[in-house]
Image (tube, rainbow, N blue to C red):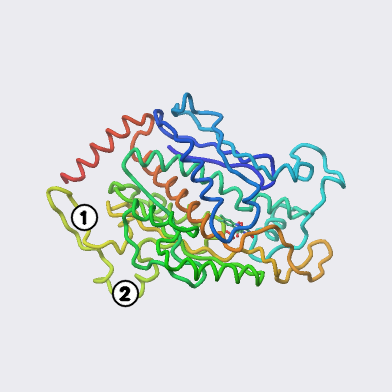
């Protein structure tokens, strides 16, 4: 079964990831993983850290001659910025006045700084922010892009993109074809499908940056050709929509998750929300609409999965808000770390990646995932069986 763990601080030497449960026999496309990483670094509205980093994954375990062995995959991504922090973020040298410069004592509202310090007993909040920083999501993207490659082998495709930045909505009527969506979002630096909104959003982000403020937004993920029956209605903790929601909420700065029509469904009548059932000999079972975003009873129902995530604005403000210094207890302005004005563009790739991980996990929970060719045969047989149901 697929599982993963990441380690590493934002300005530490590197990020490390261990990914277990990927079937043997998957030829990894390292360039495609790196393309995901560089997409995570891009997007209008980012700070200048991205000019320093050029994220590239290195696979140091679980792969031989480019093909997965079925053993744990070990991944690393170097932090180039570590060169500027080599003393302060040295993992082994004992603390001295010289290598504990740049201490953080004025926690930023909305970041993990204060509660992280209280919980772990840190007096230098750098010990918190180095890990709560979204730098860690680079490794989640690398892992997610591997899972995406596995899903593609099973003819399951997905994409995450930006639907709203601040108050500007882009495509309320967006379609469901992953290839079309993927093409549309590469036409601009906002990962939006509607190019006519680009100038308006650029202006909004630029004005927000000049004001020392930040923005959030809404992300949409669409996954197609997911077989019915992943997840289970039999116990609360086996429901796949719940697991997806947890994974998406686990991405830094996410404050809301919707499946299908989500909160809007609450204000509709049942007749407007339930997706009527259809069948034909060629395609088998389907629904006439997809308000429920591909889930019934915590199980995929064979319709496209639609997940939306609400990202709050970035907590670090160049025009900082009130804080209290943890050393002196004086009211002060919050500290400022180099920061993005909005990270909705990279976040859309992170959210896509965690959805890919959860779907790959559900597949390998449901079917034997030891060997890719066997898994492909098993899923083909399963799809066949569902069609004949
Ligand atoms: C891709 C991405 C980039 C982010 N960049 C920043 C940033 O530059 N500055 C910042 O303060 N927060 C940034 N965040 C948000 C923080 O990581 C997040 O708010 C913080 O860890 C606290 O966690 P919470 O918001 O989930 O409660 C980013 C989030 C993501 C997903």
Observer-nearest residue: 325 or 173? 173
As helix, strand or loop, the secondary structure at mark 1 comes to strand
Seen from the viewer's position, the closer of residues 80 and 110 is: 80
Provide residue 197's location: percent of width, then percent of height: 45, 68
Residue sitting at x 50%, y 28%: 62
Asked if 193 appears above or below 88 in the picture, the reply is below
C-alpha distance separating marks 1 and 2: 22 Å
Q: Residue at x 31, y 48 (%)?
A: 226
Is residue 258 shown above or below 79? below
Left/right of residue 79 with respect to residue 378 in the rendered view: right
Instruction: Check the image and report above or below for 1 versus 124.
Output: above
Q: Earlier in the sequence, mark 1 or mark 2?
A: 2
Q: Residue at the far left: name it.
A: 281
Q: Mark 2 packing: few (<14 Cα in 10 Å), some, or many (20+)? A: few
Q: What x and y, as percent, mark residue 83?
A: 73, 42
**Where residue 72 appears, x then y in whole percent?**
50, 31
Q: Residue at x 66, y 45 (%)?
A: 9
- Quadrant for ligand 1 reads bottom right
Q: Quadrant of the N terminus?
A: top left
x, y percentage for residue 334?
73, 66
Does residue 305 appear to the left or right of 39 in the view shown? left
Left or right: residue 103 compared with residue 319: right
Q: Residues within 10 Å of mark 1 (few under 14, many from 20)?
A: some
Could you say whether the residue bearing mark 2 is in a helix, strand or loop? loop
Nearest to viewer (mark 1 / mark 2):
1
Per the image, the residue denoted by label 1 is 286
Q: Residue 44 falls in which quadrant of the image?
A: bottom right
Query: Which residue is denoted by mark 2 in the rendering?
Result: 268
């Amino acid at each position: 079964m697929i599982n993963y763990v990441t380690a590493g601080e934002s300005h530490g030497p590197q990020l490390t990831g261990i990914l277990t449960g990927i079937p043997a026999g998957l030829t990894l496309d390292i360039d495609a993983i790196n393309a995901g990483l560089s997409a995570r670094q891009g997007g209008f509205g980012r700070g200048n850290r991205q000019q320093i980093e050029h994220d590239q994954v290195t696979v140091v375990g679980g792969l031989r001659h480019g093909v997965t062995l079925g053993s744990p995959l070990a991944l690393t991504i170097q932090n180039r910025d570590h060169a500027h922090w080599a003393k302060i973020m040295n993992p082994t040298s004992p603390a001295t006045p010289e290598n504990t410069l740049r201490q953080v004592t004025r926690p930023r509202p909305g970041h993990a700084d204060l509660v992280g310090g209280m919980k772990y007993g840190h007096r230098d909040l750098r010990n918190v922010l180095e890990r709560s920083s979204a730098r860690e999501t680079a490794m989640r993207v690398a892992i997610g892009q591997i899972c995406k490659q596995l899903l593609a082998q099973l003819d399951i495709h997905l994409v995450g993109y930006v639907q709203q930045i601040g108050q500007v909505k882009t495509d309320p009527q967006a379609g469901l074809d992953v290839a079309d969506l993927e093409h549309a979002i590469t036409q601009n630096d906002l990962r939006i499908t509607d190019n006519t909104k680009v100038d308006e959003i650029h202006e909004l982000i630029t004005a927000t940056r000049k004001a020392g403020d930040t923005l959030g937004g809404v992300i949409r993920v669409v996954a197609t050709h997911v077989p019915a029956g992943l997840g289970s209605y039999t116990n609360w903790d086996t429901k796949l929509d719940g697991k997806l929601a947890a994974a998406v909420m686990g991405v830094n700065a996410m404050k809301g998750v919707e499946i299908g029509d989500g909160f809007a469904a609450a204000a509709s009548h049942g007749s407007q929300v339930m997706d009527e059932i259809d069948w034909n000999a060629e395609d088998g079972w389907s629904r006439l609409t997809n308000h429920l975003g591909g889930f019934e009873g915590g199980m995929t129902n064979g319709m496209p999965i639609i997940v939306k995530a609400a990202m709050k604005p970035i907590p670090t403000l160049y025009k900082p808000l009130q804080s209290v210094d943890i050393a002196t207890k004086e009211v002060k302005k919050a500290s400022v770390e180099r920061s993005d004005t909005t990270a909705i563009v990279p976040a859309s790739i992170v959210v896509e990646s965690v959805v890919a991980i959860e779907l790959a996990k559900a597949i390998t929970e449901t079917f034997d995932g030891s060997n890719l060719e066997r898994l492909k045969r098993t899923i083909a047989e399963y799809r066949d069986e569902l069609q004949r149901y």
